[in-house]
Image (cartoon, helix red, strand yellow):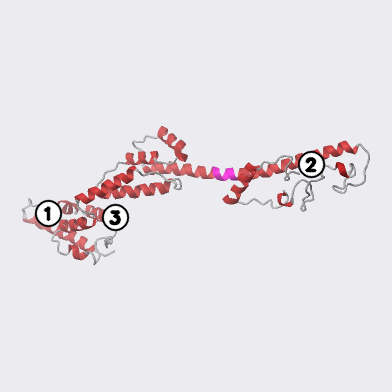
Amino acid sequence: MASSGISQPLPIFDGENYDFWCIKMKTLFLSLDLWDLIEKGLSPTERTSAAEKKNQQNDAKTLFYLQQAVSDVIFPRIMGATSSKQAWEILQNEFQGSSKVKTIKLQNLRREMENLKMKNSENAMQYSTRMIDLINQMRTYGETIEEERIVQKFLITLTEKYDHVVAAIEESKDLSTLTLTELMGSLQAHEQRMNRNSEENLESAFYSKTNLNKSSGHKKKGINHEQTSIKSSKEIYPPCSICKMTNHMEKDCYHKGKPQCTNCKKFGHLEKFCRFKGKQFQANYSQATEESLFFASHIPNEEEDCLF
C-alpha cells in the first residue's frame, strides 16, 4: 500500500488479482466522485474555462491515483497515458482482456455456475463461500446476478440431507425477498441441531449396550437362583468342583463346560467381556461409533459367552 494524500492507503496492483484490485479502485473513485472521468473521459462539450480547468484537475488527480496504485513493475505500462481513462483501459485490456476475451471468460463462468453443486463433504458455509467466489468473478466481467437467483440456485443444489429443511424454508419464507445471509442463518442452525442429535445418538447407543449387558446378566443370575431353589429341597451333595455349591452333583452342574471370568470369577463370559472391567465411557466419536456398531451387530442371547 502506498500513501497518496487520501485518508486510506491505496491497494497496489502488481500483476496478480486484477479483478479484485479493479473493484477496490472503482469503489474509491466512486467515493471521490471521479468515476465518470474513467468511464466517460473528459467531456468535449464543456468549453467554459472554469469547468474545463476543474475537469482537467480532477482527471490529473485520478491519473495520479492510478499511477500510485500500481507497482513499479506495472507502472511503465501506463506511464505514457495522458488521461485517467486511457490508463485504465490499458490495464483493463492487458489484464482483463478485450471485449471478446471477456465474453469468452464470462461464458465459461456461466457454464461453471450452471454445473455448480454442493459436495457431500461440504457444509453450508463452505459451499456458500465457493458459490460467492464464482459470483464475484462473474460480476467483475459485467454480469448482473440478482439475490433471488442466487438463493434459488443455492437451495436446489444442496445435498439430500438438507431436503426437509429446504422444504420448510420454501413453505415458510418468501424466496423473492430472502437473502443469502438469512438463508445461511437457517441452514447453520439446522446443521447445529444435526450435529447435536448425532452426538446424543452415539452416547445413547453406548449406554444402551451397557444396560443390555447388565439386564442380561441379571436374567442369567435369576435362572441360577431358580435352579438353586428347586434343588435346595433335595439332598445335599459334596461341593461341586466347578462351582463349589452343594445342591447338585458335578455332572449336573449348570456351569459345566462354560468359561469362568478370571476378573469377577463368574461363569458364562471371558475376562475381556466382563462388565466390571473397563467401564469408563470413551467420549470420542471414533470409539463411540465402534461401540455402537458392535452393539447393533452383536446383540447377545443366552447361548453367547458374554452373558452371566
* Viewer-closest of 100 and 136: 100
Q: Which segment is the magenta one?
A: 197-202
Q: Residue at x 33, y 42 (%)?
A: 114
Looking at the image, is 262 positioned above or below residue 179? below
Q: Which residue is mark 2?
A: 221
Q: Answer with the quarter of the image where residue 29 lies.
A: bottom left
Q: Disc 1 and disc 3: Cα gap in Å?
A: 26 Å
Pointer 1: residues within 10 angstroms few (<14), some, or many (20+)? some
* Viewer-closest of 128 and 68: 128
Task: Please state the horizontal and vertical placement of residue 182, each as a whole percent of the image.
Answer: 39, 42
Q: Which residue is mark 3?
A: 20
* Viewer-closest of 252 and 139: 252
SS label for mark 2: helix
Task: Please state the horizontal and vertical placement of residue 70, each as a whole percent of the image.
Answer: 24, 63
Q: Residue at x 83, y 42 (%)?
A: 254
SS label for mark 1: loop
